Image: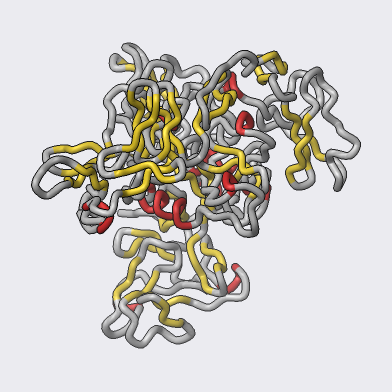
Amino acid sequence: MPSRVLPFFVLLAALGLFAGSCDDEKTKGAPLDTGAEVDQTDETSPPGDVDETSQPGDVEEVSADPCSPNPCASPHQSVCTAVGEVFQCACDAGFLFEGGLCVPGATCDGMLCPDDGACVLRAGAAQCECDTGYHLDGELCCALHASASAGSCLCDLGYSEVSGACEADPGNPCLAEPCAAEPDHRNTCVVDATSQGYHCDCNTGYHDNQGSCTLEVVSACATGLVCRAGYCVAPGSTNEQCLADFDCHTLNPDAPTLCNAAAAGGICMSCGQDLDCPGSAVCNEFSTCATPCSSNSDCPYGTCYTTQGLCGQRFCNSDADCFSGTVCIDENGDGSGLCMRVPCVETQCSPYLPNGTCEAGATCLGGACVTSCTPNPCSELNKGQCVVGSSGVLCLCDTGFELDTSGNCVRSAGSCPTGFTCEAGVCVDRGDVGFNCALDGDCGSGLTCSSVLPSGTCSGCGVCPTGQTCLAGYCLRPCVDASDCAGDMVCRNHYCGRKDCASGADCGTGATCVLNSQGAGTCNRLPCL
């Protein structure tokens, strides 16, 4: 699982209250938005063009008031949503976007739900959901600390009914919260008949694993779901769903948004404007991408908080309160869990697992299973030669490059170009205006030279070379623009720094493009013999 997932659970709960007053109880404590759909067949917001061929992600450049007059004229597709200076068209209520058209969907007509529950449309089907503060137990919606028994909801052991709610008895040992300090998500107090009168159980969503409460990670997802990015999701996806950060950047490739893939539907967070969000989502007051809504049916993975007009995550007490393959996970056992995706062991080749498994005869390259070199599937930096061998399709290093210990193709060591000398295994231009070092002796007493970047970098700051400043342990050269820096260096935040590259063509004569530890290309000095 991604390392940042569990802190997001706490963040979602902590920031769950919308600012301002609420018209009804259901708008209080609204958690941060998921707003994301997983099943393509349940998409109700096909954005963009006004003809019947519009697809998710298509947008039209329009005037400053994109929805006036309403440009959405396709049959049953008249709901217009403004996203910055563009508009997106959504299907009318009761219709789903399938095959480029808005077609009749499921209906709640004739659907009978228990008291304290209501019918909603999710994932193309009608289902009953309990109101906030209730959980589904069999065919009944029961309040917190109550369970279904013989056709009615009865308070659990240690609780008694008071004004329709189950309140803890005065002698209930759980009133003192004896499990609150227990480690490993074992904070749920359960009254029992033991001499102690209670025991501490794993919180909702966690399972006892040899004495420790851990999230269950399934080896196979439920029918109709596939494992992607470590979570069980529907095979199709829409613009509002995210499984990785790049899913959040469909409208703005440079958006700062990050994906919380654990949340039901996926949540794009840290947005600064609407265009930082995917699909029809907008950036809410919590810097989180949220989908506009008018009812719960507009929120396949959450609840519509009508005061704000935005989808938010759904609170839950048990898995029965969740939907579309999600489960209830309660981090601290306070009875206010959130519907989250089911963690799984991912093995199948996909963009989220570019080295996954394929059927016999196919090779996983770039997240897709391929069987031939047409079209060329080899897109890695300096690794564009495609051959079909006995084990399938292979990508080989380009001419003049060789594999390093990390599996990246790097320039083979050779002679240096004119104007460069070979020092410490790299090609150096000592006459460059931005030259810093090639050897430790170029830096001064107590400093060492890292000769990888085109200028070289002195580190271990004591007294830096003339004209350089010590920052974070490195001697850096101040600059106004790139002309103050060495070739194949750029001016970053007033100091000379690395130059990004996508291929060797982005670097000059004495440099080559090399992948760094984050998978991005950087111009480095040429290796030499």
Q: Quadrant of the N terminus?
A: top left
Q: Is residue 445 above or below residue 67?
A: below
Residue visible at 46% across and 51% down in the picture? 12
Q: Nearer the viewer, residue 97 or 300?
A: 300
Q: Is residue 89 above or below residue 110?
A: below
Q: Is residue 413 shown to the viewer in this render? A: no
The picture places residue 425, in percent across and down from the top left corner, at 30, 59
Q: Nearer the viewer, residue 75 or 108?
A: 108
384 sits to left or right of 40: left
Q: Quadrant of the C terminus?
A: bottom left
Residue at the right extreme?
A: 69
Residue visible at 25% across and 39% down in the picture? 157
The number of numbered badges drawn on the structure is: 0
Q: Nearer the viewer, residue 366 or 490?
A: 366
The picture places residue 122, in percent across and down from the top left corner, at 56, 24
Residue visible at 49% across and 77% down in the picture? 477
Q: Nearer the viewer, residue 326 or 409?
A: 326
The picture places residue 490, in percent across and down from the top left corner, at 55, 64
Q: Is residue 203 shown to the viewer in this render? A: yes
Quarter holding residue 250: top right
Residue visible at 50% across and 56% down in the picture? 15
